[in-house]
Image: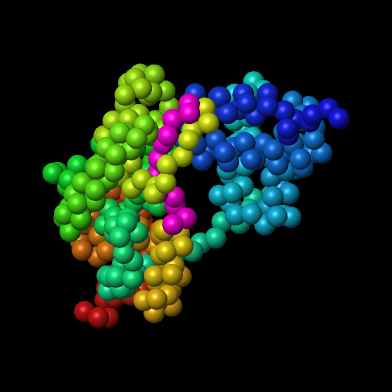
Amino acid sequence: MPRGPTSSPTLLGVLHDRLVTRRYSVRTVEAYSAWVRRFVRYHRGRHPRELGEKAVRDFLTHLARDRGVSASTQNQALAALLFLYRFVLEQPMAVPAGVLQAKRPHRLPVVLTREEVRRVLEQLSGVQRLVASLLYGAGLRLLEGCALRVKDLDLARGELTVRSGKGARDRRTVVPAALVTPLTRHLEVMRARHARDVREGGGFVALPDMLREKLGEGAARSWPWQWVFPATRSYRDRASGELRRHHLHESVLQRAVPEAARAAGLSKRVTCHTFRHSFATHLLESGYDIRTVQELLGHRDVRTTMIYTHVLNRGGLGVRSPLDG
């Protein structure tokens, strides 16, 4: 049986190469590839070159009407297909008109009080507590915390750099003073373990983009490029044969944090991202201006940051009613 477009390495291979060349993240590469496969399956295996704007419009409408996807999911599918037609098939396409738009929910983020944050963190221990404390104390997304590299952590200045965050943007944020000593001790233990890995023939780490060729093979084994929170086990990379460590997997925290919230007796739905919401809200409560909070969070548009003004613990919309005066 001839292989269809969904299983052909050519289309997805070129898509992968074009995405990597344009410095898209690993997760985006995986997501875009998955959407192209779903698009082809929806049109019964026809090659995208045989399809066009109407086929894209029908697929996006199907996602909203029949699958009930969110607006952000539908937008990601659209971005993947526009990229496919522009950079892989070289058939640039405008955003199709007449697409049934998925509904964008207007939900306020769940925010913990300072006391609730303390109670949740007390239910965690070891590396899990350290990462969760950093998510709250620095306002990090989960992957940003798990994939932090040693070179991007500056404890002397009390700051860290998030590399290629959401939207492929770098940003700096604060390292809580309360975490400087625990992080210093943690790094001492990790550095000793890394030295042991090197002696045993391992100690390699994956490098972003083409940096390996630029910096040389030694960089992949050097201490500055190692993960702050490495996985407990090493793995053998299939392509290079190197013995590497991945960073701490996000699922570790995704399981631990909700369990800690339940153990702390909280009735709120708490996820790892709740710490980031709480970070922003507590900064605004403390009197920091919204532009500062926007910069620390890495939001492109201040309107995204404005949502936290609606959940300040001052009632109403975060303002003092004139009646109370």
Residue 166, located in which quarter of the rendered image? Answer: top left
Name the outermost residue toward the left: 156
Taking the spot 36% from the left edge, 45% from the top edge, the residue there is 230
Residue 76, located in which quarter of the rendered image? Answer: top right
Q: Quadrant of the N terminus?
A: top right
- Camera-side residue: 150 or 116? 150
Can residue 1 be seen in the rendering of this structure? yes
- Camera-side residue: 95 or 199? 199
Taking the spot 55% from the left edge, 35% from the top edge, the residue there is 29
106 left or right, relative to 233: right
Colouring mode (rainbow / by chain / secondary structure / one colour): rainbow
73 left or right, relative to 179: right
Taking the spot 68% from the left edge, 27% from the top edge, the residue there is 9
Q: Quadrant of the C terminus?
A: bottom left
Can residue 143 be seen in the rendering of this structure? no
User: Where 140 falls versus 26 (above or below)?
Assistant: below
Name the outermost residue toward the front: 200
User: Where 220 falls versus 283 (above or below)?
Assistant: above
Residue 77 in percent (x, y) is at 62, 42
325 left or right, relative to 206: left
Residue numbers of the magenta segment: 240-252
Taking the spot 44% from the left edge, 50% from the top edge, the residue there is 249
User: Where 16 falls versus 257 (above or below)?
Assistant: above
Name the outermost residue toward the right: 1
Is 250 colored magenta in this rendering?
Answer: yes
Residue 121 in percent (x, y) is at 31, 67
Residue 302 in percent (x, y) is at 35, 49
- Camera-side residue: 171 or 106? 171
Residue 64 in percent (x, y) is at 68, 52
Label tally: 0
